[in-house]
Amino acid sequence: MSQDVLLKVDDLKMHYPIRGGVLFRQIANNYAVDGVSFEINRGETLGIVGESGCGKSTVAKAILRLYEPTAGAIEFDGKDIINMSKPDLREIRQDMQIIFQDPMESLNSRHTVGTILEEPFVIHGKGTRAERRKWVTDLLDKVGLQSDSVNRFPHEFSGGQRQRIGIARAIALKPKLLICDEPVSALDVSIQSQILNLLLDLQREMDLTLLFIAHDLAVVKHVSDRIAVMYLGKIVEMNDAESLYKNPVHPYTRALLSSIPVPDPERKKVHDVLTGEVPSPINPPDGCHFHARCPYAEQICTKQRPELTTTNSNPNWLVSCHLKENFIN
Ligand code: SF4
């Protein structure tokens, strides 16, 4: 693992057995995540984008070992996360934090904001009571909330303010990696940009590395250095954000981009329209998983699964499509 790589995920799989019948035997598998690999350098933001159910949030939870992966390797800051003991995992989670779409789900509604923000320090045995109170006030200031918020409860805040509380708690222990799992999807558009700008400011200030997950490519592009597009448990395209946005190659990426407005006259508008539903990750289709929705599908696409490989022109541009070279401008 190179010095600059903070997180390396290699061939990660999360398969859930489906049981049924009188004997409740395993009758199928849910291939929620099926062979995902990527690296994130220190200080970088990798965006993961895809429709609901593509496995992007499962990847996030598997990295933190909130889910136990079926197979694969995860290396964080040079340490093997998959085979780590529970006490070591508890320690290393100080350096890997997550913020969720709905902070209400992760904020204890019976506790004041002061208690919620003090909790990470208490759990990890940090500071005296007076020091912890000072740190909580500093955290509130960092995320743009008044210091008197300590005595209020989560339900007394707006959605955007609650997300600020969730961010404050996530950065309390000065993590190296912040996983943002749809952090603005539930917020009004005007509030979304405030939260995104807060995250970018904190990233600069604290030298954070971000894994940013969302279903909206416009949001992901705003914050990401590189973007991975996921479809049915697999990455289908990965490139730097600017190039992916200007020259999408995989028909699924092209269709996702077609659905967002084009304020940039230099970006070529593509007109692939996404039709139909995402197939079930239980017994996914043979060949390319996207073939039933792909306007360019050929016979090979229904039989042979395309590998995620580099394009002829760029070793950092990965695409999983038999016809990818035909789509490169
Ligand atoms: Fe479409 Fe075939 Fe490429 Fe799959 S491999 S995205 S079906 S052209």
Image: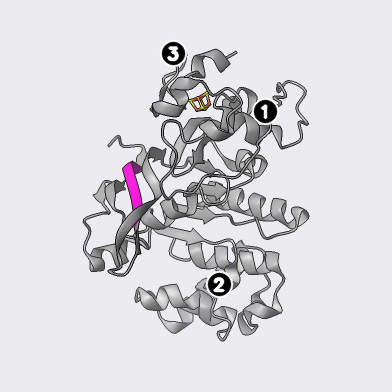
* Magenta stretch, overall SS: strand
Instruction: Find disc 1 in the rendering and name its residue.
Output: 272
**What's the distance in space between the residues labelled 2 and 1, CA to CA?**
37 Å
Amino acid type indicated by mark 3: Asn
Question: Looking at the rendering, in which quadrant would you find the N terminus?
Answer: top left
Q: Nearer the viewer, residue 189 or 255?
A: 255
| Part of the protein shown in magenta | 8-16
Q: Nearer the viewer, residue 134 or 125?
A: 125
Question: Looking at the rendering, in which quadrant would you find the C terminus?
Answer: top right
Label 3 packing within 10 angstroms: few (<14), some (14-19), many (20+): few
Label 2 packing within 10 angstroms: few (<14), some (14-19), many (20+): few
N-terminal of the two: label 1 or label 3? Answer: 1
N-terminal of the two: label 2 or label 1? Answer: 2
**What's the distance in space between the residues labelled 1 and 3, CA to CA?**
23 Å
Residue at 71% across, 37% down? 259
**What's the distance in space between the residues labelled 2 and 3, CA to CA?**
45 Å
Q: Nearer the viewer, residue 237 or 284?
A: 284
Q: Which mark is residue 312?
A: 3
